[in-house]
Image (tube, helix red, strand yellow):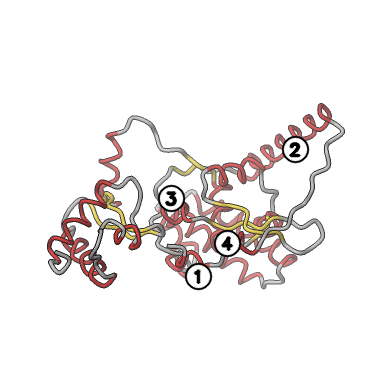
Amino acid sequence: MMNDLSSLRQIIEGAILAADCPLNLDKIIGLFDGEQPTRTQILEALEQIEESCSGRGFELKQVASGYRFQVRQEYSEWVSRLWDEKPQRYSRALLETLALIAYKQPITRGDIENVRGVAVSTNIMRTLIEREWVRVVGYRDVPGRPATYATTKNFLDYFNLSGLGELPDLSEADEVGKVNEELDFSELVEEANHNEQGTALAAETATKQTLEEASAEARAIDYNIHSLFPVDGYTQSGRDDEKEQVERDNDAVLDNDIKTSPLPQVSEKSSSNADVFSIDDLDRED
């Protein structure tokens, strides 16, 4: 039967439809006892399934963890009405932080603060880790040994990416006018200009970039925040609100220190090489 591509296609199609998570090639091969299809046969069947979805409201999508069926993005507005709950909304600060981690990984919290020109709220990092979009992958060999962060497969799956190579090119946003046109969100232009100035100043002192390079990067981040994160809602959050959140986090930590002082000594463990992965490793894991 493995020579019958039509039957193979139907088996794979049914398995992907019934699975509660994406199926990679190894999982698909594991469906068969005895005579197993080759990877070439499976890829050919997957290609036929993808072609058969043309003109339908759903598609076969390859993400980092494997293949899955999903509603086409252009129809999500109507399909989402099947659920009463509203999508979770994220602040601009959180999305900027996530974008920087995605493009600059592995990156420390201090690196993020240098580029953004403002302290990163503890709640932002906690949210990203709890969503399993970001994880600690190592510790930089400098005084203090700060943790380095990178994105996860869950991040790639959630945003329909098969690998980090599918991230939008930073050079796609050449000017604020183009960014505004892509976003269809005119009120962001003024805020983008403000962020551009802050980012350029931080970049000049922290990374010795020219003002032009820093400006281009700030505009690119503005563009990619919205091209990367179209699924969840987006809320504007000014620098003043973000600073207030950081101050609240600091006050909470200080209050906790007073109540629990003296603090126990925390031993520092170095991350093993197994904890650290590169962009290529993401493609090799499955």
Tell us which disc is closer to us: 3 or 4.
4
Percent of width and height locating residue 242: 64, 42
| Contact? badges 3 and 4 (CB < 8 Å) | no
**Mark found first going from the N terminus, 1 or 2:** 2
Q: Where the C terminus falls, by quadrant?
A: bottom left
Q: What is the three-letter code of the residue carrying label 3?
A: Phe
Q: Residue at x 29, y 59 (%)?
A: 28
122 or 192, nearer to the observer: 122
Residue at image mark 1: 280
Which of disc 4 and disc 1 is earlier in sequence? Answer: 4
Q: Quadrant of the N terminus?
A: bottom left
Report if the CB atoms under discs 1 and 4 are less than 8 Å apart: no
Residue 190 is left or right of residue 249, and the answer is left
Q: Which residue is mark 2?
A: 250
> Pointer 1: residues within 10 angstroms few (<14), some, or many (20+)?
few
**Amino acid on which the number 1 mark rests in the picture:** Asp
Q: Which mark is residue 218?
A: 4
Q: CA distance from mark 2 to mark 3?
A: 33 Å
Which residue is located at x 29 percent, y 70 percent? 39
Choose the circle earlier in sequence order: 3 or 4: 3
Question: Regarding mark 1 in the picture, which secondary structure is present there?
Answer: helix
Residue named by callout 3: 185
